[in-house]
Image: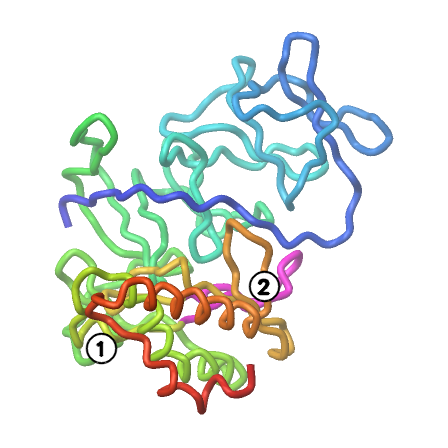
Amino acid sequence: MKKLFFFLFLIPIFFFSQKKEVLRYFISEDSLVGVKNQKGEIIIPAKHSNWTGIKNGEKVIGETIYLEYSKALEREKNATGYVYDRKGNFLYQPFLYDNGADYFEEGVRRFVKNGKVGFADQNGKIIIEAKHDFVSFFNYGYAAFCNGCDWEKIDEEHVRMVGGIWGVMNYKGEIVQPVTAMSEKEIEIEGKYYPYPFQYSQKEKEILSFFEKYEPLFIDLRALPYVNAISEKEKNLFFEIVERPKENFPYYRVNTYTWEKWHDNQLDFIVSEDGKEIYHFDYFEEKISFNKWLKKEIKEMLKYQEEHPDHPNKLEINKYNNIISGI
């Protein structure tokens, strides 16, 4: 595995916060940003730039606090900004990706320490220690890593990693060896196949079965706007639980993957710990109940179909009366 290309996409961070002490940003006279607690005490001094336009007195949202570049603090190579806990303790520097802090994928994001890359969760907990020269974001339970590799510029906007010794790790940070592909469950990474990475309890299997029954409808909804008719191999989706209930996140996160095992972030869902509440989860919007979201999607796609009668993909809604009758 000698090269890894990066494709840019925008996924802002959304948090599920429990009730906690109110923290607020403050702006110093020289326009730098810090944080105060509800007593007005400074917990993070104003040493950070304000490139994103934080307002004085603006409330801090999230389980951790991200602040931007500081001349007063050391900066890791290939990192950007600084992450603190809500008491003002420094935690880590996020990996620089797409001109900003790395996004969370499958519940974790990359950070840099001593020139190496590891992973932290949304509570700021280090999940995988920083020990490789580079690591990709997680997709379908795996992340590619390399040692002895380096950046190569493709054009003004894109770079790739070249050289070095490559491997693949799981959520535990363990190196995983490729296998011979035996079924559609294996995942292909740079021409090699790796074992199916997920394991589920009976309760979790039941959660996934809920989404699996909607697979044909989801495929038709997503295919309708495509210019070309989708192939048979594209008529497959995979649903996996990539995050489980924990402090500050009382949900199962269910990601949807395309036939290539690539995350389709338009079809993300969260399910309450008891399995009774199901929501569509869009990073750009508030979570919305599954039934309400599906009604909205069907309505919009039927309207689109009416306005574009020549499209090769059709949504024959009558085929799905048995599974949508209850919404």
Q: Which residue occupies 51% across, 52% down?
A: 283
Earlier residue among tags 1 and 2: 1
Which residue of the protein is positioned furthest toward the bottom in this rendering? 322
Q: Position of residue 113 (x, y in %)?
A: 44, 34
Quarter placement of the C terminus = bottom right
Task: Name the element at disc 2.
Answer: strand
Q: Position of residue 141 (x, y in %)?
A: 36, 63
The quarter of the displayed image where residue 198 is located:
bottom left
Packing grade of label 1 (10 A; few <14, some 14-19, many >=20) is few
Q: Position of residue 85 (x, y in %)?
A: 65, 39
Does 103 sit above or below residue 188?
Answer: above
Q: Which residue occupies 46% across, 22% down?
A: 75
Q: Which residue is mark 1?
A: 184
The residue stretch that appears in magenta: 240-255
Q: Is 278 contained in the magenta span?
A: no
* 3D distance between C-alphas at marks 1 and 2: 31 Å
Which numbered circle lies on residue 176?
A: none
Apparent side of residue 16 relative to residue 262 in the rendered image (left or right): right
Q: Is residue 270 visible?
A: no
Apparent side of residue 200 relative to residue 98 in the rendered image (left or right): right
**Colour scheme employed for the rendering of this structure:** rainbow
Apparent side of residue 185 relative to residue 55 in the rendered image (left or right): left
Q: Which residue occupies 42% across, 26% down?
A: 76
Q: Which residue occupies 55% across, 71% down?
A: 290
Q: Is residue 303 visible?
A: yes
Task: Name the element at disc 1.
Answer: loop
The quarter of the displayed image where residue 44 is located:
top right
Q: Which residue is mark 2?
A: 288
Packing grade of label 2 (10 A; few <14, some 14-19, many >=20) is some
